[in-house]
Amino acid sequence: MTYVIAEPCVDVKNQSCVDVCPVSCIYIGDEAADRILYINPDECIECGACEPECPVTAIFHDSAVPAEWAEYTELNVNWFTDADGVRARINEMKPAEA
């Protein structure tokens, strides 16, 4: 179990959640390529400190991710092993505005 960052974070990337995470498990890799932040499920201790800090309500416990954003649970996990694949899928799901 872990927390997940979902679609409302795409292109917002407010990092207030990073500042309160006691184990530094929230990442943004390539500032230009990554359009969303990611929580490492192997490092997250489920403290929940990040959730209320998100100004766009993008962070959910994995058991409470809204159905329309369920794929973000898998994307958060996969980013740590296949960042390029996840970036491509994010771009398919929510094309960048020109």
Image (cartoon, rainbow, N blue to C red):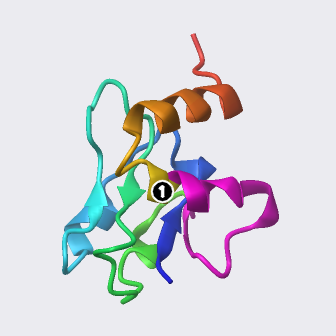
74 falls in the magenta region:
yes
Image point (59%, 50%), residue name: 8
Residue 10 lies, with reference to residue 51, above or below; the image says above
Left or right: residue 87 versus residue 22 is right
Image point (80%, 64%), residue name: 67
Left or right: residue 44 versus residue 94 is left
Report which quarter residue 31 is drawn in.
top left
Image point (26%, 32%), residue name: 30
Give, as a single range, the part of the protein colored magenta.
57-75
Residue 70 lies, with reference to residue 85, above or below; the image says below
Left or right: residue 83 versus residue 92 is left
The secondary structure type at the circle numbered 1 is helix
Q: Which residue is label 1 attached to?
A: 76
Q: Residues within 10 Å of mark 1 (few under 14, many from 20)?
A: many
Image point (58%, 21%), residue name: 96
26 falls in the magenta region:
no
- Which amino acid type corresponds to the residue marked 1 in the rendered image? Asn
